[in-house]
Amino acid sequence: MSLASTRIAARLLAVAALAALTAGCFQPMYAERTDGTPGLREKLMGVEVPPVDKPNASREARIQVEVRNALAFKLYGSATGMPPTHRLVLRFTTSRSSLILDPNTALPSSENYGIDAQYNLIELATNKSVMTGTTFSRVSYDIPGQLQRFARARAFRDAEDRAAHEIAENIQTRLASYFVAGT
């Protein structure tokens, strides 16, 4: 056996030994608990996401519905969860800016859309805030043919949907972190 193959064998042995030592420390985040305590999935299903509080038929109401639906699917896997233990209060603002303007028509050919969201998790038993946070999403979109109004409106709506799903993903990740770590 050469010196190089001996070193490789020693490194593989060291990696296997470290893996064996830390194998008992690892616990999957969404695994079922054997000690009887509720798992992360059950805790997330106890988060109530209130309905839309924006004016009917407004663009903000459509975005809030999109965020709420995406968040409900990520938390519950369906439209409803278990009896609520927590309530999530969500507020957001949106922004839109033109990135590139066509010099001939002075119309934008690329725009940026953003959502800034603030959320507050309230424990229903004590009616106290247990976690607050902020998140944001910035997505860009191209406008195919500046004079095509439908294409521009559709690109803008797709950007809103992508940003809403990103906000829901960020909030779900933060809630999962809170329920696992407790902070």
Image (cartoon, helix red, strand yellow):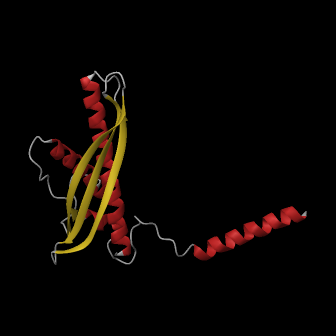
Q: Residue at x 36, y 61 (%)?
A: 173
Q: Quadrant of residue 37?
A: bottom left
| Front-lying residue, 9 or 100 | 100
Q: Residue at x 75, y 68 (%)?
A: 11
The relative height of residue 91 versus residue 142 in the rendered view (above or below) is: below
Residue 162 drawn at (x, y percent)? 33, 43
Residue 144 drawn at (x, y percent)? 35, 25
Q: Is residue 39 visible?
A: no
Q: Quadrant of the C terminus?
A: bottom left
Q: Residue at x 15, y 46 (%)?
A: 61
Left or right: 99 with respect to 59? right
Left or right: 54 with respect to 166? left
Q: Is residue 182 visible?
A: yes
The relative height of residue 45 versus residue 93 in the rendered view (above or below) is: below
Q: Quadrant of residue 154?
A: top left
Residue 179 drawn at (x, y percent)? 33, 70
Q: Quadrant of residue 181?
A: bottom left
